[in-house]
Image (cartoon, rainbow, N blue to C red):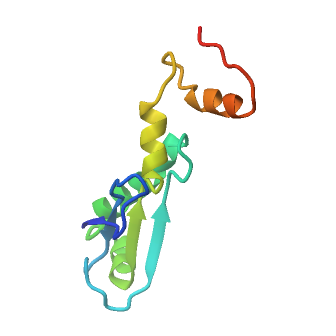
Amino acid sequence: MAMKLHHKTLEGRRVFGVEISARVGRNDGRPTFYVDGVHHAREWPAAEYPMIFAHYLAERFGRNRRVTSLLKRLRVVIVPVVNVDGFDYSRESFVDGQGLDWAYAATSALGYKFEHG
């Protein structure tokens, strides 16, 4: 089941995740195993493992005894991108196509002049 976290980011974006279990959406006291990724803006591949894990569980539920048993006993909540603002900013903000906007901001704050091309 896809889910929206209750609060938006500082820049107003929604954070999405998925719950995988035998009884999705029920608050029945079962333990919850939480997995997330992309804490830091430029760690783009960090979203891949949580998504691969979600696919693994969903694909094997009802077909694999161990996965099915696990998902009957607990809930798995996966949020592939926790830092949505940083993730979007790092993918949309580029200087001269090089993605060096952060270097410009950092060096400017330190009093250095960053030359563009």
Tell me residue 48's x, y (percent). Answer: 45, 47
Give me the residue at 31% from left, 91% from top. 28
Q: Is residue 48 visible?
A: no
| Depicted 42 relative to depicted 68: above or below | above
Question: Image quarter for residue 92?
Answer: top left
Tell me residue 71's x, y (percent). Answer: 35, 77
As drawn, which residue projects farthest toward the bottom? Answer: 29
| Depicted 30 relative to depicted 98: above or below | below
Question: Image quarter for residue 4?
Answer: bottom left
Which residue is nearer to you in this view: 83 or 47? 83
Give me the residue at 54% from left, 40% from top. 42
Q: Is residue 39 visible?
A: yes
| Depicted 25 relative to depicted 102: above or below | below
Tell me residue 2's x, y (percent). Answer: 26, 63
Direction from residue 101 to residue 16 in the image, left or right: left
Tell me residue 15's x, y (percent). Answer: 36, 58
Q: How many marks?
A: 0
| Depicted 65 relative to depicted 106: above or below | below
Direction from residue 24 to residue 39 in the image, left or right: right
Give me the residue at 37% from left, 91% from top. 29
